[in-house]
Amino acid sequence: MLQRKLQHLASTVAISAIVTGVLAVTGAKPVLAEFEIQEAEIDGGEVEIEYRGAYHWGIPKAAEGEEAEEDEADFAEVNDTRQSHELEFQMGINDWWMISLTAGFDQPLGDDLHASAVEIETQFGIIRRHGNGIGLAFQMGYEQAINHGAVDDFEANEFGFGPIVELASGPFLLTLNPLFGKQIGTYADQEGLGFEYGWRGEYDFAKHWGLGVEMFGNIEDLANAGSFNDQEHSIGPTLFWKPGGDDYDEEVGDVGEDDDDNGKVTKPAETEFSMNVGLQFGLTDITSDTALKFQGSLAF
């Protein structure tokens, strides 16, 4: 079992590395800014590889160098990302502790796609949800920025932390991701804490299908938050497809290798795939008008 799992992981990592290389070379192609909703559930021994990406339209005018009604200072931190991608590897150490490593890639307006950050993160389960009810976990991580171009545009490293809350009732699931961040290092420019959030309301209308609403936002410095219009906020619909594991795995009764200890049949490692695609619509002047988002994960 361990050998098969390691072989599966090696082949999947190799394929993911090739895909990432292709993205880096063909950055002009509008592939799909990452919008992540982290779930509270942790499965011990499970390895998951996840891709998140997005492509933006309607970059704020100030980022395009055009005239804007607001003062130039209001757009000093304007989001000028055309597309961004994240590739994440995570593993559940046990049912209450998970670690992950994420590589980020961005393509600013008028620039090439390049590596932008590396993040290491850990998550601790507090309340494990079984069906309906409440799920609760706590996440924290450190992001190391990979800077390019002029020093004035360099990003700071950041430490982030916050809870993950799930509320489930029948086919409906509400997930909340409030996240606080503190910039660290030479390029830190923050008086208080930063705040990012994401929430998702999902309704599963069929066995493998769900439809939901997601909202994301970012306030770079709560001590100088400014008005709502000076912050990044977006909302939009998302379609979910969750085929789950291979049904064949559940029906294996006389196929496989006998366990030496008890004579039971050893099943192959179950593989689960899920994906979602959605649109995000900007609610403020410094948010892109529209973003097409995609997320796909493979767990085994």
Image: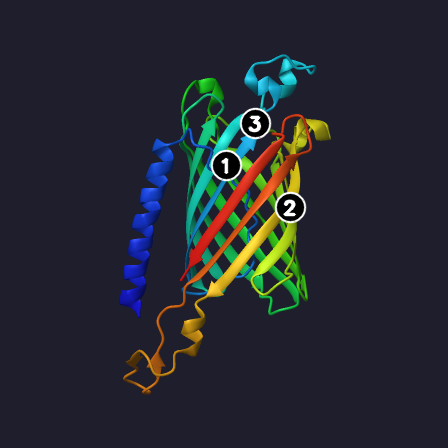
Residue name at image x 46 percent, y 48 percent:
121
Label 2 close to label 3 by CB (< 8 Å): no
Determine whether the residue tagged by mark 1 lies in a helix, strand or loop.
strand
Q: Is residue 42 shown to the viewer in this render?
A: no
- The CA distance from mark 2 to mark 3 is 22 Å
Q: How is the image coloured?
A: rainbow
User: Could you tell whether 285 is left or right of 34 in the image?
Assistant: right
Label 1 close to label 2 by CB (< 8 Å): no
Q: Position of residue 117 (x, y in %)?
A: 43, 36
Amino acid type for the residue under numbered disc 1: Glu
Q: Which mark is residue 79?
A: 3
Q: Is residue 11 shown to the viewer in this render?
A: yes
Q: Position of residue 150 (x, y in %)?
A: 43, 18
Label 1 close to label 3 by CB (< 8 Å): no
Q: Is tag 1's residue or tag 2's residue first in the polypeptide sequence? A: 1
Determine whether the residue tagged by mark 2 lies in a helix, strand or loop.
strand
Q: Quadrant of residue 215?
A: top right
Q: Which mark is residue 158?
A: 1
Residue most extreme to the bottom: 262
Q: Is tag 1's residue or tag 3's residue first in the polypeptide sequence? A: 3
Q: Please name the residue that numbered disc 2 is placed on.
A: 237
Screen quadrant of the C terminus: bottom left
Q: Nearer the viewer, mark 1 or mark 3?
A: 3
Screen quadrant of the N terminus: bottom left
